[in-house]
Image (cartoon, rainbow, N blue to C red):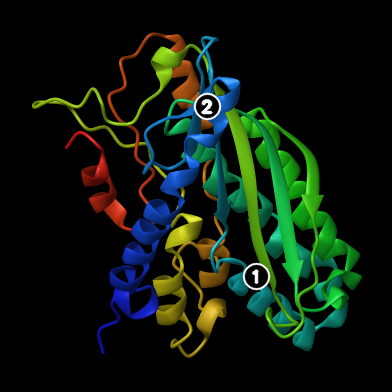
Amino acid sequence: MTIKYSDLVDYEKLDPVKRKALKTFESTFKNPERIGIKVAPVGETSAVLDFLEYDFMLAFNVEGLGTKNLIADSLWRELKKKIDIEAEFQGGKYYRFLGQDAVAMSVTDLVAVGADPIAYTDVIASGNSEWFSDPKRVDELLSGYALAANLAGCAIPQGETPTLPNIIYNETLDLMGSSIGIIKPKSRFTYGQKITDGDIIYGLPSGGICANGISKARSIVEKLPEGYFTELPNGKMMGEELLTPTPIYVRPIIEMFKAKVDLHYISPITGHGFRKIARARFL
């Protein structure tokens, strides 16, 4: 049986809602103009505010991890069933890079419009606060957030840990967050306005499947006899390989800006995949 991504995430239903939301909220766009701030062209990976009297812009967004943490949850549960002592020392490691994944989803969307991230706020939502009773698991998750913030060059000064019973399953979390960054000078603002015929497209490599693209992989692996414990030729378990952290692309792209590289458009390839390149406002 063929598994299509649209069987898991149906953008034919989601995209009209996004467009309707923008249309509904359009009447609010002029509100910041009362203090000399203008909403820049919308529809890209981050919202951008133009401080008209200054040579900088503010970019921000909210993004979620997706379903990647379900892999760590599954490995942790199965390992704990087998050997409690081993689970105590090893189970937490599966959460090590989920914080990095969550941060990566947001800060990459910032740098895609030319913004240098300065702060990230995390939301770690649970269905039951019992999830946090394992200190190893908590420590590994939080250390991943800190590692990612250091790689991106931003701070994590605030966060939220809501408990949402009956909305989130007790054995897992919903990880999301919001980041804010500075576009300075304004000439770095990148939203497709420079795209021309003959432009060369370059890609930055990933260590594996990026966090927002994991649902289809999960649906396939969970049908295997050994599931996430399936051994690969490199000696790793399938689950461990899928938990390879999403790279933080911020510093390489910012260094390109500093080196005066003329970047015409930057597109994080998640969600719609390569079709996202075609949504540039000027195509």
Q: Which amino acid does label 2 sit on?
A: Glu
Q: Earlier in the sequence, mark 2 or mark 1?
A: 2
Relative to 184, residue 178 above or below: below
Name the residue: 39% across, 44% down. Answer: 268
| The N terminus: image quadrant | bottom left
Q: How many numbered discs sit on the rendered protein? A: 2
Query: Quadrant of the rendered structure where residue 208 is?
Result: bottom left
Residue 237 against residue 25 in the figure, above or below: below
For disc 2, the marked residue is 33
* Identity of the residue drawn at 55% across and 69% down: 67
Please tell me the numbered disc located at residue 258: none
Quadrant of the rendered structure where residue 148 is? Answer: top right
Judging from the image, what secondary structure is the residue with disc 1 in?
Answer: helix
Residue 214 to residue 56: above or below = below
Residue 96 position, x and y percent, is: 71, 55
**Residue 72: which numbered mark, if any?**
1
Given residues 153 and 185, the one toward you in this image is 185
Answer with left or right where residue 81 lies relative to residue 204: right
Name which residue lies at 87% across and 77% down. Answer: 130
Residue type at mark 1? Answer: Ala
**Residue 169: image location, x then y, percent:** 69, 82
Rendered residue at 57%/26% (across/down): 34
